[in-house]
Each structure stands twice: as C-alpha cells, then as structure tokens.
Amino acid sequence: MKRIVHLGALSLLLALSSTACERMEQQSTEAETTTGYSVEEVVEEKKPVTVQEALQADAQLARTMGLEKFAEHMKSRQHYYQQFDDVNYEDDFVKIKMEDGKLKIETPTGKAKYKEGESKIETDAYKQKTETN
C-alpha cells in the first residue's frame, strides 16, 4: 500500500513539473512575439554608435583612473579605434588623439604616447619610456 502511495505522489509530481515547464516555455515565446524582441536584446549593453560617443565614454574613465591606468586602457582600445579615420576627442579634462598608429593622451597630470613598439609616459613626478621589440 505504501509503495502505491509513493508511486502516485511521484507521478503527480512529474506531471506537475512537466506542465509547469511547458507553461514557462509557452509564456517566453508569447513574450517574444508580443514585444517583437527577445530578452537578450533588451539586456544587451548599449554600444556607442559613433567614434565620438566611444571616445567620450572612454574619456570619462580618465577622471577616475590615474594616467598610467587610463593610458593602458586606451592602449587596449587602440585596435578598436584604428578602424576609424578621425579619432580626436578633447574636453576640459582629457585630450585623446590617434593618427598614423600613434595614440596620444593628455590629462592635467601628464602625457602619454604610444606608437608601435614604444610607449612614453610623462608626469610632473617622473618620466617612463618603454620599448618593446
């Protein structure tokens, strides 16, 4: 008798869980069709549309980072900016310019320059020059 009760409870549990899964799947497809876009599209981070918007977003980081960290960040973004012709941004805090593969950054604390195989950071406190071969 005990075995029959357990089997009945197990079959009831399986039936409820399978119908719950079907209802969740049906709701997600209904939500996609009613809104016209999926959840992934809504959650996906908004990407800058123009090079100026991207530069402005990066320039905001200069206010929170030191010159060395910001210069390293911009060096990592150099590949992205190479696809654009006019990479030039200036506001009251930072100047960013890239031409002919050379990246130049200027903040109130100092200047940084990157070109192929060479980097140079100058501040009031020190100068650092690095060459990579």
Image (tube, grey):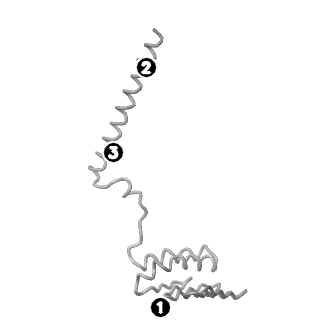
Query: Which mark lies nearer to you, 1 or 3?
Result: 1
- Check the image and report above or below for 59 versus 129: above
Distance between the alpha carbons at the discs numbered 2 and 1? 73 Å
Q: Toward the viewer: 91 or 39?
A: 39
Callout 3: SS: helix
In the current view of this chain or complex, which residue is farthest to the bottom? 100
| Quarter of the N terminus within the rendering | top left
Q: Residue at x 43, y 76 (%)?
A: 53
Q: Residue at x 42, y 79 (%)?
A: 51
In the current view of this chain or complex, which residue is farthest to the front? 133
Chain-order first, disc 2 or disc 1: 2
Callout 1: SS: loop
The residue that disc 3 covers is: 28
The residue that disc 2 covers is: 9
Image location (x, y in percent) of residue 77:
51, 77
Classify 10 Å Cα crowding around label 3: few (below 14), some (14-19), many (20 and above). few
Callout 2: SS: helix
Chain-order first, disc 1 or disc 3: 3
| Contact, mark 3 vs mark 2 (Cβ under 8 Å) | no
Q: Toward the viewer: 60 or 54?
A: 54
Q: For this view, does 50 lie left or right of residue 62? A: left
Tag of residue 13: none
The residue that disc 1 covers is: 100
Image location (x, y in percent) of residue 35:
29, 52
In the current view of this chain or complex, which residue is farthest to the right? 125
Q: In the image, what residue type sits under mark 1?
A: Asp
Quarter holding residue 106: bottom right
Tally of numbered discs: 3
Image location (x, y in percent) of residue 82:
45, 83
